[in-house]
Amino acid sequence: MTFSLVARSADGRLHGVAVASRFLAAGALVPAAQAQVGAVATQAHANLAYRAQALALLRTGVTAADTVAGLVTADPGREDRQLAVVGMSGDGATWTGPRCHPWAGGQAGDGWAAQGNILTGPQVIDALRDAWLAGGDLPFPQRLFAALVAGDRAGGDRRGRQSAALLVVKRHGGYAGTGDQLVDLRVDDHPDPVTELSRLLDLHTMIFGRPDPATLRDLTGALAAEVADLLAATGHPVGPTGLDEALAAWSGLENLEERFVPGRIDPIVLAHLRQCAAN
């Protein structure tokens, strides 16, 4: 009822899971990941205990293949389950029980594993694999998502679409560096969940992404005057404390505080400020 990809970034600093299914809130059941440990997907007749158990094994240095083998060997329900694991190094691993509804199967390679059941055919897994391998130039969350899109376009779940999710972890990669969840997005019930997940990922990138120092613009001269006018148009006129203070206040209300840089402005912030002032 599900197709998914678990993967690790080339530098080993990020782990994640992308999943889509004709099942309510697959993101609540399928994925799990821990920074600097690994990522897990449990599906078909999911065994939710696999998530914590797999991460516990990976933390002790057990390989992905041995983690999968150990969990399914000990599970009397293994013939109805799928499991995928990727660790800090080496190949990912995947298991498909012989009683999973067809088409069901998976593939794995260095730092990734793709699998699915009740699919339109094996081309879904081929598409996940090919898109993942071809996406090395993309940021890690977008690379995972691109693979999910490819699987969806290749046919996905043969019953249709309902939910999708993206989970990415990185040590201190969460909000303001206070957590490890870099991306944790879910579409629980939607007629086109992968497309909706794309919208959420774009919004997430705008709000939580860090500014690129190479693109920051100095708040001087004509640009500073424009920003002051735009802030005034949005109800945040520059006061005695100066332009930075007014821009910081507006950015916080727009949830863009992660992109605020004193004395400079992120082009993404500037574009959003212009849009808000125009409205």
Image: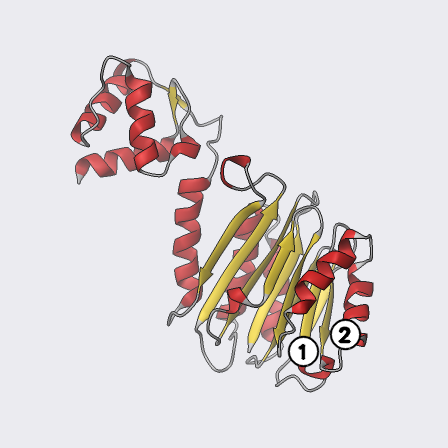
| Residue that mark 1 sits on | 81
Q: Amino acid at mark 2?
A: Val
What is the distance, in whole Å, between disc 2 and disc 1 at their CAs?
Answer: 9 Å
84 relative position to 2: left or right: right
Secondary structure of the residue carrying tag 2 is helix
Query: Sequence order check: which comes first, mark 2 or mark 1?
Result: 2
In the picture, the quarter occupied by the C terminus is: top left
58 relative position to 207: left or right: right
User: Based on the displayed image, in which of its 4 quarters is residue 55 positioned?
Assistant: bottom right
Camera sees residue 130? no
Front one among 77 and 101: 77
Residue 254: % across, % down:
31, 38
User: Based on the displayed image, in which of its 4 quarters is residue 46 positioned?
Assistant: bottom right
Front one among 157 and 170: 170
- Residue at 48% from the left image edge and 34% from the top image edge: 210
Up-down relation of residue 252 to residue 153 (above or below): above
| Residue that mark 2 sits on | 72
Residue 190: % across, % down:
38, 69
- Residue at 66% from the left image edge and 63% from the top image edge: 51
27 relative position to 224: left or right: right
Looking at the image, what colour scheme do you see? secondary structure
Camera sees residue 267? yes
In the picture, the quarter occupied by the N terminus is: bottom right
- Residue at 46% from the left image edge and 60% from the top image edge: 186
Residue 216: % across, % down:
42, 25
Are dots 2 and 1 in contact, CB under 8 Å? yes
Q: Amino acid at mark 1?
A: Arg
Q: Residues within 10 Å of mark 2 (few under 14, many from 20)?
A: many
Front one among 117 and 53: 53
